[in-house]
Amino acid sequence: MPLPSLGRLSSRTNLKAVSSGRHRNAAKAAGDEVVEDKELTSYLAALAPDSDPESTGTGSRFGDAQVYQLRMNLIASQQLKDIALARNLTPQALAQEWILERLSWEGQAASAQERRHSDAMTDEFHFPADAFDQQPLVGR
């Protein structure tokens, strides 16, 4: 079993010595001043490609689009891949197409339901004046 240090003891455990405050990197930290190399910066900027319109780095091409992850079981994932292959699409493109179609369908169904609900509130029913004047049938 190793013996504890005979130096000052730390407050956390009595087995670790407190550091003396001197580090190998202490001299570097004091002399570290960030100096921008303007020539190198301009050289790298000239080498960098123009902003690629296919890039999602800035998000400007896609506007306010968001990325969603989709987790599927193995069978559903394989089925998606097979259908996408049959349609010459990537699985991602097929899943996106299906989701957008479903959202469109849900939007149309919701607006149709709202229309039916508002139409139901405005329907008027007309009954003949003598429809409720009959005597109720006895024995039923």
Image (tube, rainbow, N blue to C red):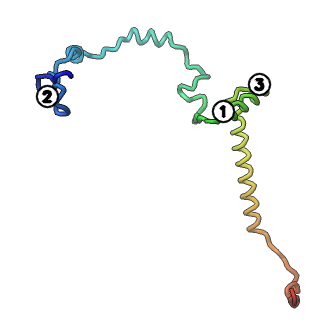
Mark with earlier residue (3, 2): 2
| Crowd band around label 2 with a 10 angstrom C-alpha radius: few (<14), some (14–19), many (20+) | some
Q: What element carries label 3?
A: loop
Amino acid on which the number 2 mark rests in the picture? Leu
Give the Cα distance between marks 3 and 2. Answer: 70 Å
Residue 11: x and y in percent read: 16, 33
Q: What element carries label 1?
A: helix
Residue name at image x 19 percent, y 32 percent = 13
For marks 3 and 1, give the one nearer the viewer: 1
Please, is residue 17 above or below residue 101 in the view?
Answer: above
**In the rendered image, which quarter is residue 21 located in?**
top left
The answer to the question of whether label 1 and label 2 lie on touching residues, with beta carbons closer than 8 A, is: no
Specify the quadrant that holds the N terminus.
top left
Residue name at image x 76 percent, y 66 percent = 120
For marks 3 and 2, give the one nearer the viewer: 2
Residue, disc 2:
9
**In the rendered image, which quarter is residue 91 located in?**
top right
Q: Is residue 133 visible?
A: no
Badge count: 3
Please, is residue 137 above or below residue 15 in the view?
Answer: below
Amino acid on which the number 3 mark rests in the picture? Asn
Residue 34: x and y in percent read: 30, 16
Give the Cα distance between marks 3 and 1. Answer: 21 Å
| Crowd band around label 1 with a 10 angstrom C-alpha radius: few (<14), some (14–19), many (20+) | few
Residue, disc 3:
88
Residue name at image x 58 percent, y 19 percent = 52
Amino acid on which the number 1 mark rests in the picture? Leu
Mark with earlier residue (1, 2): 2
The answer to the question of whether label 3 and label 2 lie on touching residues, with beta carbons closer than 8 A, is: no
Residue, disc 1:
74
